[in-house]
Amino acid sequence: MGNLGKDPMNSIWGSPCSDSDLGFGSDSRFGNDSRFDPHSKFKKSCKVCKSQDASVCNCNFRAPARELAAPLNSDCVLVNSVVGSKTVQKVAEATLPFTAFTPAIPAGSTIRSVSVVPNLAGITRNTTIIRDKVVNIGLIPVTITVTFTAPGTTTPVLTAILSTTLPFQEHTDFPGACPEDTVIEPPLVIEGIFAQPGVPVVGTSGAGAGLITTNAILVKIVLRTTITVIRQVIVDSHGGICDVNERRCETTTTPTTNTLPAP
């Protein structure tokens, strides 16, 4: 442990001895006149105990500088530039005929109540950017419960249920947005749920096939979210910015056509 040399009481880390020359008197190392006491007026050098080091120990420890795994060959950085951010609303809706429910609601029934329970965890969204616009199409699963009374009666109140999906779509103007940009969109939030019985619908079966009837219910859900369009750019050490893809906004002669996947 260290280089003690000829004197085992005098190492390269200093001496453990006192002012009394190897500890036969009062110890000034730790008393009021100790050289380790920052308030002492009688700081002693290590020569008191036969050391050649006349300095008072004052160590400043610093963590070693970290080194990169590999040196960088450029002072430019890649960052995401925000093209735009907007709060938008989307509307999911469908007109559902009485015959779509289980059991089927008889034509002419009186609707007592409509309960719509959406499943936010099951929402399907497909987002596409075209020049200056963000197009969003999706489906939201719902369970609809209807209470009704049959025609000509006031009781009993019956219940019919339908589990289905309501489609929604929205296109949002985003000046400067290009197809190569990226869209960030947080989860949808429901702002309102609406149901309207007696909405006209074209009959699909029986004697009413092809005829317009009012034996249907319109269900509408208003959704809200924030759409943010970002673009990767290169920034140099002087603050200059250049696009990663300089041709991302070039127009094509063929309009964008997408077949979106089913949920």
Image (cartoon, rainbow, N blue to C red):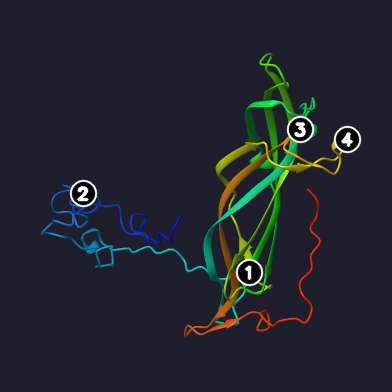
For disc 3, the marked residue is 98
Q: Which of marks 4 and 2 is in front?
A: 4
Name the residue type under label 1.
Answer: Lys
Residue toward you, 149 or 56: 149
Residue 125 vs 259, above or below: the answer is above
Determine whether the residue tagged by mark 3 lies in a helix, strand or loop.
helix
Q: Nearer the viewer, mark 4 or mark 1?
A: 4
For disc 1, the marked residue is 133
Determine whether the residue tagged by mark 4 lies in a helix, strand or loop.
helix
Residue 123: x and y in percent read 69, 46
Name the residue type under label 3.
Answer: Phe
Q: Are marks 1 and 2 in contact (CB under 8 Å)?
A: no
How would you rate the neighbour count of disc 2 (Cα within 10 Å): few for under 14, some for 14-19, many for 20 or more?
few
Residue 190: x and y in percent read 56, 44
Residue 117 vs 86, above or below: the answer is above
3D distance between C-alphas at marks 1 and 2: 77 Å
How would you rate the neighbour count of disc 3 (Cα within 10 Å): few for under 14, some for 14-19, many for 20 or more?
many
Name the residue type under label 2.
Answer: Phe
For disc 2, the marked residue is 30
3D distance between C-alphas at marks 4 and 3: 15 Å
Q: Which of marks 1 and 2 is in front?
A: 1
3D distance between C-alphas at marks 4 and 1: 45 Å
Question: Which residue is at a point 87% across and 37% down the rendered structure image?
Answer: 205
3D distance between C-alphas at marks 4 and 2: 109 Å
